Image (spheres, grey):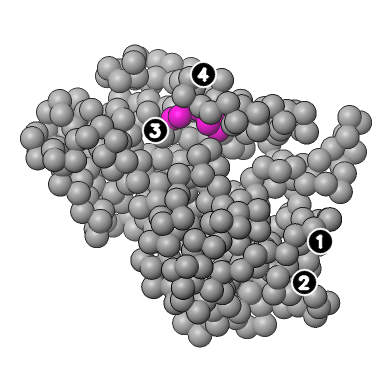
Amino acid sequence: IPLLYCKKRYIFFFCGSGSGKSTFEAQKEVIKTFEQNWRLLVIRKVKDTMKDSVFWELTGIISAWGLSSFFEIKHSPLYIRNIVTWSDVVFRGMDDPEKVKSIKWVSRIWIEESTELRKGDFDQLDLRLRGKKEMQITCTFNPIDSDHWLNTDFWQYGSTDQVELLHTTYLDNRFVWEEYKGVMDRLRKQDERLWEIYALGKWWRRVEGQIFESYTDIDSIPDDAKFLGRGLDFWFTNDPTALVAIYQYDGGLILDEELYRTNMTNQDIVNHLKSTWARYQDQIIADSSEPKSIEEIHRWWFLIEWAVKGPDSVLFGIQTMKQFSFSVTKRSINLKKEFQNYVWKKDKDGKVLNVPIDMYNHAIDATRYFISYKFGQTQKVPSIRFIGR
């Protein structure tokens, strides 16, 4: 409630996973559109990630609160307008800075996943606040490296007359599911340091024991790349459904994160596949623990098959993937984040074990399903490139 009425220029909402920060910020901005004629600029580093994250959060709140008749909503380009006050919401990615500079009379800015931005990006956005009404930038983010500018330039100095800082975790979220609390409790038993980072939202230095230690980046999928298929990992409430497309190119493989979103029903997944012009004969290898979901998607005529599972199948898939070199597409932000944080367990003495911690692995699991299915029976496999940054 205090954040809803806070009038400071900068709000930094710094949280662990499951704290509800993005949902709250979406709720706050929907309420703000009814106050007066605002212009809200919503920002992420990569434009292509907007539709499945901040736009989806805002339109979901509008629908859930029964306010759809008060808003004009466009999907291409993404745009929301409150037709009562004429407040509007525009969406931009910092990968297209010229379009950000062209936005006029911005009164409010919401930067989701602010750690993706450089300090120079933030400074440029700060200059965009030229509206005639009270102006405010809200940053929502999970912690990363303690050397990040959000920590060194803001968090270490605490709240001031212009800056409001708030740190929350899943323990502060009374709406979080008990099942999710159980997931966090299991993580604490597996690796307390990772629990402090992921659940408690503490600044950290480079994660030790990374399973995939390096990757390089590719801007886009080459026109002559050969599409092979997709990997699909099912989740719903607290963890995302992940869909990763795999291409063959220049003797290797390219991966592209196509979907990474919570609360996806099977119909939502089908609609997403249709929206990407997925062909019905495109092969999808999916999590075999969801046979009902696989069957429902198959009934829409998509060629979807079960992933091969069994004793040591996770370790087998990791070992297969570790034969490859990695890169990651510009829009594959979540896949890249998982590669940075997917780690081996440690025993009580700090010795690294040959067992992965079951966290930061939804897009990786989707990728592993396809690679294990397609290449797991042969020692001669191509190198892999993951698209990214």
Q: Which image quadrant is residue 365 in?
A: bottom right
Residue of label 2: 376
**Secondary structure state at the residue bearing disc 3:** helix
The three-letter amino acid code for the residue at tag 1 is: Phe
Residue of label 3: 23
* C-alpha span from label 3 to label 1: 37 Å
Compared with residue 94, is residue 367 higher up or lower down, i.e. above or below?
below
Query: Does residue 17 show up magenta in the picture?
Result: yes
* C-alpha span from label 3 to label 2: 40 Å
Residue at image position (25%, 56%) is 75
N-terminal of the pair, mark 2 or mark 1, is 1
Residue of label 1: 316
N-terminal of the pair, mark 3 or mark 1, is 3
Q: Position of residue 207 (x, y in %)?
A: 72, 41
Q: Position of residue 138 (x, y in %)?
A: 35, 31
Q: Position of residue 37 (x, y in %)?
A: 11, 33
Residue at image position (65%, 28%) is 182
The stretch of residues the image draws in magenta is 15-21
* C-alpha span from label 3 to label 4: 14 Å
Query: Does residue 47 show up magenta in the picture?
Result: no
Taking depth in this image into account, of 183 and 13 the one nearest to the observer is 183
Compared with residue 156, is residue 254 higher up or lower down, i.e. above or below?
below
Local packing at callout 1 (Cα closer than 10 Å; few below 14, some 14-19, many 20+) is some
Residue of label 4: 172
Local packing at callout 2 (Cα closer than 10 Å; few below 14, some 14-19, many 20+) is some
N-terminal of the pair, mark 3 or mark 2, is 3
Numbered label attached to residue 386: none
Residues tagged 2 and 1 counted as in contact (Cβ below 8 A): yes
N-terminal of the pair, mark 4 or mark 1, is 4
